[in-house]
């Protein structure tokens, strides 16, 4: 647990969460993002604070879960496809307003009439 990490703070006190949790398990959580790039855009992250995929106890389990959730929710939201984007050790600068420092993967459903922004 890292007290400066937004994801760790969410895990510590989820009632202050501005995001909708779409799935939660023992090791991982998935929630919608505040500024989605597509309708249904959500992120999946481990509950263990790690910044790099190589530091994860089982990165294969994480990736399998992300694909499972991507398939499940894109079907639920009637999207024919999805895009995955991994944030691995991306925001290490403490003075960066987008600093996260906690590995996470974006799942962006692709809708027939929708476009991805800012990729």
Image: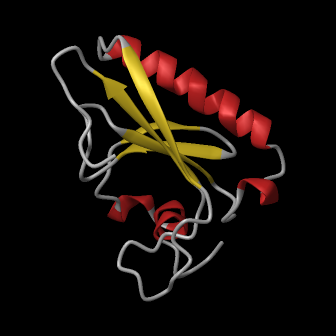
Locate residue 35 relative to residue 7 in the image: left or right: left
Locate residue 36 relative to residue 12 in the image: left or right: left
Locate residue 116 relative to residue 25 in the image: left or right: left
- Count the labels in the image: 0
Q: How is the image coloured?
A: secondary structure
The answer to which image quadrant residue 101 occupies is bottom right
Extreme residue toward the left, this view: 113
Where is residue 92? Give x, y as percent: 56, 77
The residue depicted at 26 percent of the width and 53 percent of the height is 34
Q: Compared with residue 21, is residue 53 higher up or lower down, i.e. above or below?
A: below
Q: Compared with residue 13, is residue 112 higher up or lower down, i.e. above or below?
A: above
Where is residue 40? Give x, y as percent: 29, 31
The residue depicted at 45 percent of the width and 44 percent of the height is 43
Where is residue 98? Give x, y as percent: 38, 72
Extreme residue toward the right, this view: 57
The residue depicted at 66 percent of the width and 72 percent of the height is 1
Q: Compared with residue 56, is residue 13 higher up or lower down, i.e. above or below?
A: below
Where is residue 95? Give x, y as percent: 43, 88
The residue depicted at 58 percent of the width and 32 percent of the height is 66
Q: Nearer the viewer, residue 33 or 114?
A: 114
Extreme residue toward the front, this view: 119
């Amino acid at each position: 647990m890292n007290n400066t990490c937004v994801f760790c703070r969410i895990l510590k006190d989820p009632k202050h969460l501005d995001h909708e949790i779409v799935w939660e398990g023992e090791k991982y959580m998935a929630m919608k993002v505040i500024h989605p790039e597509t309708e249904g855009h959500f992120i999946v992250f481990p509950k263990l604070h790690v910044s790099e995929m190589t530091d994860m106890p089982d990165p294969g389990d994480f990736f399998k879960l992300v694909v499972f959730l991507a398939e499940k929710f894109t079907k639920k939201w009637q999207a024919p496809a999805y895009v995955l984007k991994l944030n691995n050790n991306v925001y290490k600068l403490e003075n960066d307003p987008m600093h996260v420092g906690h590995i996470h993967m974006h799942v962006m459903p692709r809708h027939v009439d929708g476009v991805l922004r800012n990729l």
